[in-house]
Amino acid sequence: MTEDPNIIQSLSRGLEALELVAQRSMTPKALASALGVDRSTAYRILCTLAAHGFVERDPLSEQYIVSSRKVFALSSTISADSNWPTLATPWLKQLRDELGEAVSIAILQGDEVVYVNHLPSLEAITVGSLMGLRRPVYVSAVGKAIIAFLPAAECEDLIDRLRLKPMTSHTITSREALRAELAQVRRQGFAVDNEETFLGVRCVAAPLYDHTNQVIASMGLSGPASRVTSERLAEIGARVRTLAHEFSLSLGARRDL
């Protein structure tokens, strides 16, 4: 394969080295082996990264580690300057354009979810705008997609304080049933609102993660049950899960989540 002439090879190698050191501490010898270069080249790469503050040398083990100070400084700058729900718009648009239904981003606030980004359906008959609306976490797909992936103790604490009021005949109203539902969400990687909030409306959602690999929100799709049929839930769920994962990667989440 012909190499791209626009790629700066030395910079590419330095970034590859930074990714390797981020995974585990390394000596120049270990880095040289991993990159397929000689030890002196690996040492110069590490010295360059250290000069820019990206790595530090442990004086006891003589291994190089990623500088947490640099990472936190960059993270703080990015967090302060970016409105991440807005950054999700291209992924939402792709999901909406592929499947035709309304799509959204929701975050957890207390026992409810709040919709913070929304794109309307391409269809004439659709759900109304969700932007700014609140829903109980236990009835909404976007809510279940978030709480299912919270730390176990936090999830259980939230379940214990919920008042499970029926909104339709399909609403989950027992804690045991909700726990079973969340276990299913964890297994398949997406959640479903099967006419639990409104009769005739189904929703599918998947979790979103940030650079610390913590769930911070969810990405969802909503539409009439006549189009978002039971037979299509697995197909739709897989696509929502994939695009949610891709957006999470853009926020710095691990690829193996």
Image (cartoon, rainbow, N blue to C red):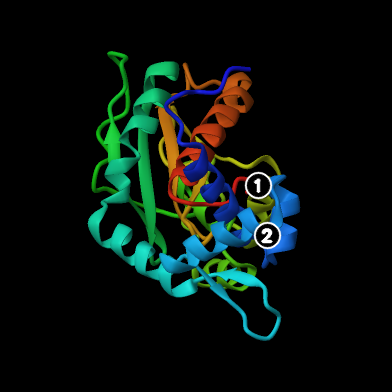
> Which label number is shown at residue 176?
2
Spatial CA distance of label 1 from label 2 is 30 Å
Give whichever of 55, 221 is nearer the camera. Answer: 55
| Residue 169 visible in the picture | no
Under circle 2, the secondary element is helix
Q: Earlier in the sequence, mark 1 or mark 2?
A: 2
> Which label number is shown at residue 90?
none
Which of discs 1 and 2 lies nearer the camera? The answer is: 1
Q: Is residue 90 left or right of residue 24?
A: left
Q: Is residue 96 left or right of residue 67?
A: left
Q: Is residue 118 above or below residue 156?
A: above
Quadrant of residue 18 within the rendered picture? bottom right
Q: In which quadrant of the rendered image does the N terminus lie? A: top right
Toward the front, the furthest residue is 40
Under circle 1, the secondary element is loop
The local crowd at label 2, few if under 14, some if 14 to 19, many if 20 or more residues have their Cα within 10 Å, is few
Whole-percent x and y of residue 128? 26, 31
Q: Which residue is rendered at x = 35% and y = 38% of the image? A: 104
Q: Amino acid at mark 2?
A: Glu
Whole-percent x and y of residue 52? 41, 65
Q: Is residue 156 above or below residue 169?
A: below
Whole-percent x and y of residue 61? 71, 80
Pointers 1 and 2 in contact (C-beta within 8 Å): no
Give whichever of 39, 128 is nearer the camera. Answer: 39
Whole-percent x and y of residue 39? 70, 57
Give whichever of 90, 203 is nearer the camera. Answer: 90
Q: Which residue is rendered at x = 68% and y = 63% of the image? A: 28
Residue highlighted by disc 1: 256
Q: Which residue is rendered at x = 67% and y = 67% of the image? A: 25
Q: Amino acid at mark 1?
A: Asp
